[in-house]
Image (cartoon, rainbow, N blue to C red):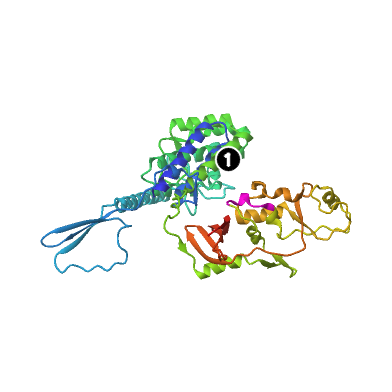
Amino acid sequence: MTEWAVTSSVLIIVVLILRQCLKGRVSLRLQYGLWALVLVRLLLPVSLGHTPVSVLNAVDPITSTQTVEREVQHFPGNVTTTLSPVEAPVNQEVNAPESGDETLDVPFSPAPVLHGVWLAGAVAVALWLTGVNVRFARTLRRSRRALAVEGCSIPVYVSQAIPAPCLFGLVRPCIYVTPLTASDETLLRHTLAHELTHFRHRDHLWSVLRGLCLALHWYNPLVWLAAVVSSRDGELCCDEATVARLGEGERASYGRTLLAVTCQGRSNLLLTATSMTGRGRDIKERILLLAKQPKTAALTLAAVVLVAVVAAGCTFTGAAPIVTPDPAPSQNTPQFLSEEEIRRYEELFDPIQFRDDGTQVSNPLCSFLFTTYDHPENLNLERFLRYFPDDGVVDVDKNTPELQALRAHPLWPYGSATFISQPIHRYTRETVDQILEQYAGITSEDLTGVGADELIYLEEYDAWYNFTSDFAAGTMSCDYGTRNGNRVTLYSTPGENGSRYVLELEELQDGFHILSYLYKEN
């Protein structure tokens, strides 16, 4: 309820400010259309998602955690304990004392009372709204007489019980005019054009929704102000559209009609009729805007749309959830991994994989086990790529530009010999970076360069090359492992002297990153 009131109030203030700044500079239809945003927000009791731009982020969150004080009375003494929700035991069996009584003193919350007051007020205003319109409808039925108007799409009546012409009726709307209006052809023509414009704009429906908003938000003075101003803007919009329908030649005479038929006085906000009443200042504003003919420039329209979109985003959404940072990693004694967890990691480091064509290839993850490092950035690139799955081999039977570039490289091992005894494996930076990023959170650009001077690198192909005809793969035979928070340490089976390799990982939601791989002597 509070969020609903706050966001609605902010949006009303924004529209009021925007309306004041753009008065006389935009089309009256656009000015009236801004209230559609307010109407939707007032009728929508919930927020559409949660965003950081919501105005509710500026409102202090209301905590629902309360302390419950329980006083247990026994003869001859009393014991009082205070339990917070966290400290209170859960699902604990409580045996009542054999003597004495137990009372539960819960702090008073005003929320149910305030909700009851709001509901009572909403019902009262809704009944008032209904009563006002039912009484007005009865008055019209008793006093009206039909007026035959050729070409009018809805019924027209003459009534002496109304101070000014109006459109009234929810299901079957009708136009009601005064005897003075009915007796003058020009006044009647302009009045019918005005009320038919209200009918085409569905203002008789908007007035009902406006009354519903007043019932739901009866306690908010900004909503009552919005109802007054939006009703006034509805009349201005109707004037603009009516003149457009009558033609520019009748702008001046239509203005005189407004002066003749509009009744001075405050309109009843709960009356759903589109009555041509208003204060002298409002009538003057309508006449002046008729003469000024405000139009909307393209730049102004863009600015209005932008402000409206931002305002809607800030007021139709709820506050972003408060994210509590994760507690610091536990400093307790590491917990040993289960046999199942160890087996799962050993399967991940299975040295052999199969390509789609069925050929065997070394597991790229095992390449991290050919070199030791305290940080992945310090791994030896030459050892890392020694048995890394290649991106293909260079065709040595054809004197391709790639082979020519390799022969020209200072690390070319065959000199001017034409026979090349070993395959030339190619490793593109894209493939290498993919594995480094997936399993270590780095790229080749982050490497410190250890072992890079032992590899041939061709910039024009963005690839490294090596020469080997044998096949090997790093292995991880895990003796045991431990977990401390999200850190996992795997210990290899020790050698004859008790030394072993230690692999440290950081578990992530979708995998893990390798942090180090070291050789620990006994």
Q: Is residue 191 visible?
A: no
Instruction: Answer whether residue 196 is visible to the viewer in this image.
Output: yes
Going by the picture, which residue comes out furthest to the left?
76
Which of the pair 158/484 is nearer the observer? Answer: 484
> Residue 467 falls in which quadrant of the image?
bottom right
The vertical placement of 154 against 74, above or below, is above
Of 408 and 397, the residue lying toward us: 408
For label 1, the crowd category at 10 Å Cα-Cα, with few meaning under 14, some 14 to 19 and many 20 or more, is some
**Amino acid residing under circle 1:** Val
Q: Residue at x 74, y 59 (%)?
A: 390
Q: Circle 1 is placed at which residue position? A: 305
Q: Which residue of the protein is positioned furthest toward the front in this rendering?
A: 497
Instruction: Name the residue at 66% across, 66% down.
Output: 351
Residue 215 horizontal side relative to residue 202, left or right: left
Does the magenta-highlighted stretch encompass residue 442? Answer: no
Q: Give the residue at x 44% y 35%.
A: 278
Question: Is residue 330 shown above or below 100?
Answer: above
Given residues 506 and 129, the one toward you in this image is 506
Viewer-side residue, 424 vs 431: 424
Magenta stretch in the rendered image:
374-381
Q: Is residue 379 shown left or right of residue 42? A: right
Q: Position of residue 139 (x, y in %)?
A: 39, 48
Name the spot of residue 454 as percent of width and height, x first: 73, 50
The x and y percentages for residue 166 are: 47, 43
Tally of marks: 1
Classify residue 288 as left or right of residue 9.
right
Q: Is residue 378 magenta?
A: yes
Q: Secondary structure at mark 1?
A: helix
Q: Measured from the top left, where is residue 388 in percent x and y?
A: 70, 59
Q: Reply above or below: 179 against 357.
A: above
